[in-house]
Image (cartoon, grey):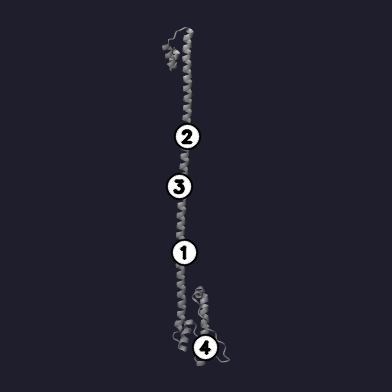
Amino acid sequence: MSSPSTPDEAPRLAIPVGPSVEVWRAMSPAARAAFLDEVNAALSERRGATRERRGLDLLVPESTLELAQCLSDLFGTDNLMGRLNGMVNSLEAKADAEATRAQQAATRAAQATTRAAQATTRAEQAATRAAQATTCAAQATTRAAQATTRAEQASARAEQASARAEQEATRARVAVVGLRAGVLAAFDVRGVLCSDELRGRVERCDDPATLQRW
């Protein structure tokens, strides 16, 4: 244990408290070195006071490891060096573990993003195929409507042709009737006596050429 301070003795520097894992991970290399220098300064002050009290003529070590080793020799704290190294190693190991977990989480997030992008691409492709199918169906409907229109137009033309044929047949019948009447009138004008049989043949004849020959 250290001896109590005398009234004339200057206050000693307090040994800094080790930072947490999060703080140590966030510290830059320069900040970590500064923290270890603070520990050096506090331990150096205690070593100087002990050397004066014991009358030891020792050189002040230059490095933290040498200083810690000297303090171990002076105070008999053989595990001081191990504690300091253990603290640093523990903080660094925890920082590395946290960094590894963060990297793994980032990798999983990137994989999830990739899967989401792939799912979005598949959905877009499916939407494109659906749009193409809709377009094909619309084109087929249009072609069917055009075919129906052409069929209706052909049917209308057929009806018109049938109507014209009917009109022509009507005119032909009227012409035949006129020819029949003309033949009979010609017989009467010429004084040709028509028997009932001949009159019946004329009235039953539908051939214009035969009627014209008569």
Residue 89 screen position, x and y as percent: 45, 77
The amino acid type, in three-letter code, at marker 4 is Gly
Horizontal placement of 111 versus 34: left or right? left
- The residue labelled by disc 3 is 133
Q: Are marks 2 and 4 in contact (CB under 8 Å)?
A: no
The amino acid type, in three-letter code, at marker 2 is Glu
Q: Residue drawn at (45%, 80%), measured in percent from left and top?
A: 86
The mark lying in front, picked from 2 and 4, is 2
Q: Are marks 4 and 3 in contact (CB under 8 Å)?
A: no
Which quarter of the image is occupied by the C terminus? top left
Residue 152, numbered label: 2
Q: Residues within 10 Å of mark 1 (few under 14, many from 20)?
A: few
The mark lying in front, picked from 3 and 2, is 2
Q: Are marks 4 and 1 in contact (CB under 8 Å)?
A: no
Label 2 vs 4, first from the N-terminus = 4
Residue 2, numbered label: none
- The residue labelled by disc 4 is 48
Q: Residue drawn at (46%, 9%), measured in percent from left and top?
A: 187
Between the C-alphas of marks 4 and 3, the distance is 90 Å
Between the C-alphas of marks 2 and 1, the distance is 63 Å
- Nearest to the observer: residue 135 or residue 31: 135
- The residue labelled by disc 1 is 109
The mark lying in front, picked from 2 and 1, is 2
Looking at the rendered structure, the secondary structure element under dot 1 is helix
Label 4 vs 1, first from the N-terminus = 4
Residue 22 screen position, x and y as percent: 50, 74
Q: How many marks?
A: 4
Residue 104 screen position, x and y as percent: 44, 67
The mark lying in front, picked from 4 and 1, is 1
Between the C-alphas of marks 1 and 3, the distance is 36 Å
Label 3 vs 2, first from the N-terminus = 3
Q: Are marks 2 and 1 in contact (CB under 8 Å)?
A: no
